[in-house]
């Protein structure tokens, strides 16, 4: 069990509202060198048409970033299954970035890992993650893993 | 009641015990450890020496006493002398024998110090355990150290250079190999790293064989007759798997040979971590892949199987990451394999990315200061070696584009086409 944030690429228009909401929610100042948790981008399809994507951590069920971290900074949130972290002992080694098949871990300007934690606190309080709450097209949804076909 | 022994409690041992309990193992677990300071992460020693981590933080999962309550096991602080595989017993230092239903060997590895004359001096150090770290800390705090020789241009060696250099100590990095990271770096990436190191004032002495350490650790003598004077010597030549506890029935090469379920050739004897030889996906051979994540996954797999749940770990490819002196180096695959080499550089960002291709498959990749794409490409390579042949998905492509990997290269990886002009050589 556990929750995931799911993207329906057909609905996404790459407007970037989710990324802005995410930076706001997490106090990410990308001008100061922090990397953004959520990236939004278009992708040219094989037929020449464009698809739009908004991606961040997928909160993998068997998350490879967790066992890769030499300092045990990452773990599964027991209640909602998001991949959460405590970076107090993070040494900024980038092992988590190398282990993640989606390149999701980010780093703050102090060099320590930061990443999408699924807005776990919001979700525990019955709210949507910031990105989901701010998506104007309904492309992003926070659902139980079992409901999510794509992953 | 069923009884299990775990010999050695590092990363692999810890994950095995955790996994056994999480997979519902109800029996008794005896954990044998030759140190109370467990389960420790050896790679954090240098961070502890420089003060970046507290001593306790070198135990990433917490202290052994807490863990023994959480996962319900007995701590037996004594070294195992032998695993008697037919009797399924462990022979202890005091000559006593204890019998079990199954045994895990997770004794890891040790730093290898070649027995050259003078290696026993108090000014000669190696790095793996907390005691090693304490020794180095003590000499750095106690005596005036101006010059150090670090032998072994490895991932461990470079971390020690970083540590000493930051304290204003003049370092000479020595290796038999002709360039830095000989087991992971392609020559052009190694050359760039060396250029940067030299620029920072680190001296490099490559293609040099150590012959002796003289003057009580204050002179290093090479086979060619040259010598360097110094105040301390750090030996990071390599590691050796702790396989001696396996008895003669257990199959051992450089490490103890295991299958995908971490079983040795002897029934009910398992092995995981740096002491084991799992599958190298690239070659299909058994090989020690001595990295933290691999030890964790092997331990986890052993634990599941010891709890009676069939679980396989396919294996891994050789890979390394090291972050030092403002640089990031990542190497994937077998650097010794031949192939055509292509370099992609983003001079503006100072990033470099090299890929070596043979028969239209990447056999080796290097990244300098461009870790962002490494996760996607690692998964891609492992998939390729594993024979899954899965297409690169859109999300991976989005990430690669975002990290500035050229579209042409992505198309190549996706299609395995033979387009020659894909590359900027
Ligand atoms: C300085 C340094 C830097 C490193 N850097 C990296 C890195 O950047 N990235 C990376 O992935 N990996 C790195 N590694 C490798 C990584 O630390 C190992 O792969 C990992 O710790 C292996 O875990 P393990 O459990 O197999 O073995 P160990 O951690 O060696 O644990 C084995 C345990 O068994 C105990 N033991 C041994 N023999 C006996 C016995 N007979 N009886 C009882 N107990 C015994 C040992 O004392 C030890 O506690 C580094 C290693 C070092 C030394
Ligand atoms: S960081 Fe990567 S590996 Fe970890 S849970 Fe997120 S997507 Fe999965
Ligand atoms: S960068 Fe930090 S969180 Fe990531 S693996 Fe290294 S120590 Fe762990
Ligand atoms: S807010 Fe919604 S539509 Fe806009 S980029 Fe994000 S996911 Fe796409």
Image (cartoon, rainbow, N blue to C red):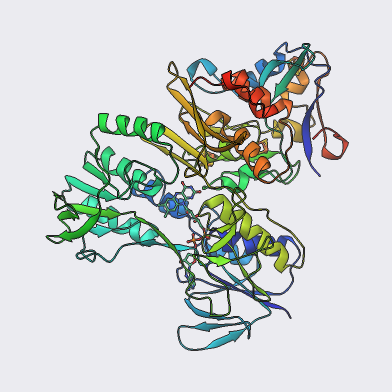
Front one among B277 and A76: B277
Q: Quadrant of residue B21?
A: bottom right
Q: Determine whether B322 is above or below B58 in the image.
A: above
Q: Determine whether A50 is above or below B320 in the image.
A: above
Callout count:
0
Q: Residue at x 69, y 30 (%)?
A: A119
Residue A54 location, x and y as percent?
72, 21
Residue B2 location, x and y as percent?
72, 78
Q: Quadrant of residue A35?
A: top right
Front one among A13 and B178: B178
Q: Quadrant of the N terminus of chain B?
A: bottom right
In the shown orientation, is residue A48 left or right of residue B121?
right
Residue B385 location, x and y as percent?
65, 44
Q: Residue at x 75, y 36 (%)?
A: A124
Q: Determine whether A8 is above or below A50 in the image.
A: below
Q: Residue at x 63, y 62 (%)?
A: B16
């Amino acid at each position: 069990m556990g929750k995931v944030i799911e993207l329906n690429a057909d609905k996404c228009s790459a407007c970037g509202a989710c990324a802005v909401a995410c930076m706001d929610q997490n106090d990410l100042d990308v001008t100061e060198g922090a990397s953004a948790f959520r990236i939004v981008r278009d992708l040219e399809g094989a037929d020449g048409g464009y698809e739009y994507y908004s991606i961040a951590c997928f909160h993998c069920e068997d998350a490879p970033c967790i066992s890769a971290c030499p300092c045990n900074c990452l773990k599964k949130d027991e209640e909602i299954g998001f991949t959460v972290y405590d970076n107090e002992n993070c040494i900024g080694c980038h092992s988590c970035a190398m282990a993640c098949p989606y390149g999701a871990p980010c780093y703050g300007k102090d060099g320590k890992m930061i990443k999408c934690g699924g807005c776990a606190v919001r979700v525990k309080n019955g709210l949507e993650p910031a990105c989901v709450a701010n998506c104007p097209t309904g492309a992003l949804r926070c659902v139980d893993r079992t409901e999510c076909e794509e992953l | 009641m069923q009884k299990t022994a775990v010999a050695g409690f590092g990363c692999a041992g810890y994950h095995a015990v955790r996994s056994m309990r999480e997979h519902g193992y109800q029996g008794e677990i005896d954990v044998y450890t030759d140190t109370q300071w467990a389960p420790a992460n050896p790679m954090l020693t240098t961070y502890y020496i420089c003060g970046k981590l507290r001593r306790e933080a070198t135990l990433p999962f917490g202290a052994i006493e807490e863990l023994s309550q959480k996962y319900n096991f007995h701590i037996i602080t004594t070294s195992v002398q032998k695993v008697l595989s037919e009797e399924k017993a462990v022979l202890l230092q005091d000559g006593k024998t204890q019998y079990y239903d199954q045994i895990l060997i997770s004794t890891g590895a040790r730093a290898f110090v070649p027995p050259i004359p003078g290696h026993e001096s108090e000014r000669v150090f190696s790095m793996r355990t907390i005691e090693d770290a304490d020794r180095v800390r003590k000499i750095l705090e106690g005596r005036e150290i101006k010059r150090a020789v670090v032998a072994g241009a490895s991932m461990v060696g470079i971390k020690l250079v970083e540590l000493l250099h930051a304290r204003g100590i003049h370092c000479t990095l020595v290796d038999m190999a002709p360039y830095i990271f000989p087991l992971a770096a392609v020559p052009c990436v190694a050359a760039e790293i060396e250029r940067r190191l030299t620029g920072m004032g680190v001296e490099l002495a490559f293609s040099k064989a150590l012959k002796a350490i003289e003057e009580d650790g204050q002179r290093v003598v090479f086979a060619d007759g040259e010598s360097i004077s110094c105040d301390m010597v750090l030996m990071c030549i390599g590691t050796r798997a702790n396989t001696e506890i396996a008895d003669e029935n257990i199959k051992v090469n450089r490490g103890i040979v295991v299958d995908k379920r971490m079983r040795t050739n002897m029934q009910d004897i398992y092995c995981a971590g740096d002491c084991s030889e799992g599958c190298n996906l690239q070659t299909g051979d058994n090989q020690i892949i001595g990295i933290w994540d691999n030890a964790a996954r092997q331990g986890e797999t052993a634990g599941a199987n010891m709890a009676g749940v069939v679980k396989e770990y396919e294996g891994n490819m050789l890979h390394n990451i090291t972050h030092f002196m403002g640089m990031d180096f990542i190497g994937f695959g077998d650097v010794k394999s031949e192939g055509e080499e292509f370099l992609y550089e983003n001079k503006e960002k100072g990033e470099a990315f090299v890929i070596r291709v043979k028969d239209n498959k990447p056999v080796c990749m290097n990244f300098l200061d461009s870790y962002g794409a490494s996760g996607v490409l690692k998964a891609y390579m492992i998939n390729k070696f594993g024979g899954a042949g899965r297409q690169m998905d859109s999300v991976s492509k989005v990430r690669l584009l975002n990290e500035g990997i050229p579209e042409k290269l992505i198309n190549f990886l996706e299609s395995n086409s033979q387009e020659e002009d894909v590359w900027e050589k």
